[in-house]
Every structure is written in C-alpha cells, then in structure tokens.
Image (spheres, grey):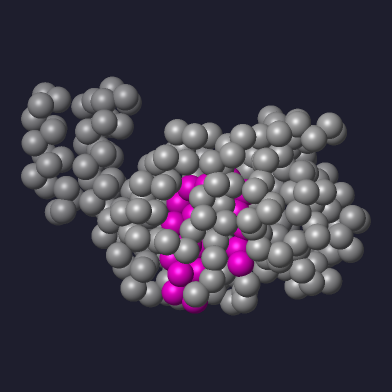
C-alpha cells in the first residue's frame, strides 16, 4: 500500500490539492510515513508558490492569501512556522521600510523578506543558533539566489542576566529599520529580551519590531520592558496567534 501511495504522490502531485493528498495519507498511512511520502508534493507546492511570490510580493501582504498558505504548507515546519497573519505583517512592513532588516531566528520569513530586500537593494541579516537549521535555510537561499540575505549561524551567548545571539556586530549595519523577532526559543534564559540591550543603539527612530508568540506571558513581559527602555509604543495584533508590533519614537 505504501509503495502504491508513493506512485500517487510522484504521479499526481500536480493534480491533487494539498488537502486531498493529506486526507488520503491520513486515511491509510502512519504519521511518520505520511511526512516522508508527502515531501514531493510539499516541494512542488512550495516551489510554485515561491515563484509566484518572487514575481509579486506586494500581492501577498494580506492574511489568508493563497500563496502564503501554500508557502507555509510547502515549507512544512509544522508547529514552528509563523502563521500567515504574522508573515503577512512582516511582508507589509518589509515593503514599506527603508533600511536594513534584522531577523532573530530564521526560516520561511527569511526567504520572503530577503526577496523583498533584494528587490529594493537592501540587506537582510538573520541570526540563527542551530547549525542544522541554518544549513537548510541557506540551501533555499541559494536555490532562489537570494544574495541580499546574510545568514549568520552563530551560537547563543550568556550575557549574565540573559542569553542571546553572539551577533557579528563589527560587520553589521549601523541601523536597522525593521526587526523580525521570532527567536531565540522561549526556554532560553531571558527569552528574547536580549535584542534590546545588545542592539538598541542600532534601532533607529521609526524602527518597527514585530515580536511573535504574544499569546505567551513571557513575550508580553518582554515587550513591556522594551517599551520602557526604548520609549516605544506597541499594540498586540493577530486574532488567531497574537504578535506584537512595536514602534520606536
């Protein structure tokens, strides 16, 4: 039965929708086998959606956009990928900001925002502490020739009260106009707080910070600390999976 499903995947991935294939897989296969056998379909859907995004990023700045839905499905990092409403907010701000972008953590958003930065002649810096994950992201950056992205595979460093990325400050831009903060993991000492004490002198007036996972009390507490330390304002957005949008004055 599993061999037969492989033939279905390879032969029909262009005709069947993702929901149809997932329904078939769930009906007949164990979860781990599903993951392996759906890979060809995910890759096809992702490549098709990525090409559509590259041709017109501006069309993908609203939640529930079918291209974003396909990108999330094709990327396949279930449970960790940002939801489409957060990705849409990241895209919208990337399209309207006017300087380098900083991303804490890397993934699908790195590709999408890197593509926008490249079209606009800007740079996108992404910090990633997991070498294996950085290798995967870099593979896709190379695949789509997204040379505007500087992906820094760097460990987390203990700064005393918190741990944060060991950022290559000497080679980074003097100021950033947009920060996408989806890392480090919440279990890290201090969570994501380290962004401000390490990078505050490079966050210029008008800089926007998009902090994901605002349903967690830790993120809300961090946002309140940042607000006090930066003299910023913020609001919580995203009805399905809240995130914080903070603006420096």
In percent of width and height, residue 187 lies at 69, 30
174 vs 68, left or right, is right
Residue 221 position by quadrant: top right
In magenta segment, residue 78: no
Q: Which residue is depicted at the point 42% across and 40% down?
A: 135
In percent of width and height, residue 194 lies at 77, 44
238 vs 175, left or right, is left
User: Which region shows up in magenta?
Assistant: 100-120
The front one of 169 and 97 is 169
239 vs 80, left or right, is right
236 vs 10, left or right, is right
In percent of width and height, residue 79 lies at 50, 38
Q: Quadrant of the C terminus?
A: bottom right
In magenta segment, residue 118: yes
> How many numbered badges does the structure rendering display?
0
Q: Which residue is depicted at the point 8% across and 30% down?
A: 4
Q: Residue furthest front?
A: 170
Residue 124 position by quadrant: bottom right
Visible in this render: residue 239?
no
Q: Quadrant of the N terminus?
A: top left
The front one of 20 and 207 is 207
Q: Which residue is depicted at the point 66% across and 46% down?
A: 167
In percent of width and height, residue 214 lies at 70, 48
């Amino acid at each position: 039965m599993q061999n037969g499903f492989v033939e279905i995947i390879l032969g029909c991935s262009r005709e069947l929708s993702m929901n149809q294939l997932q329904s078939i897989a769930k009906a007949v296969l164990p979860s781990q086998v599903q993951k392996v056998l759906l890979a060809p379909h995910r890759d096809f859907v992702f490549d098709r959606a990525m090409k559509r995004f590259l041709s017109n990023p501006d069309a993908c700045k609203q939640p529930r956009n079918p291209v974003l839905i396909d990108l999330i499905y094709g990327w396949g990092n279930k449970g960790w990928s940002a939801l489409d409403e957060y990705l849409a907010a990241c895209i919208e701000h990337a399209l309207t900001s006017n300087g380098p972008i900083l991303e804490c953590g890397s993934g699908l958003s790195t590709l999408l925002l890197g593509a926008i930065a490249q079209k606009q002649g800007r740079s996108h810096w992404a910090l990633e502490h997991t070498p294996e994950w950085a290798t995967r992201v870099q593979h896709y950056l190379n695949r789509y020739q997204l040379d505007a992205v500087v992906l820094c595979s760097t460990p987390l460093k203990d700064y005393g009260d918190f741990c944060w990325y060991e950022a290559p400050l000497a080679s980074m831009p003097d100021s950033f106009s947009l920060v996408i903060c989806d890392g480090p993991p919440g279990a890290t000492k201090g969570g994501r707080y380290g962004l401000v004490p390490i990078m505050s002198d490079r966050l210029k007036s008008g800089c926007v910070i998009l902090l994901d996972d605002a349903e967690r009390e830790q993120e809300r507490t961090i946002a309140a600390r940042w607000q006090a330390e930066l003299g910023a304002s913020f609001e919580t957005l995203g009805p399905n999976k809240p995130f914080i949008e903070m603006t420096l004055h």
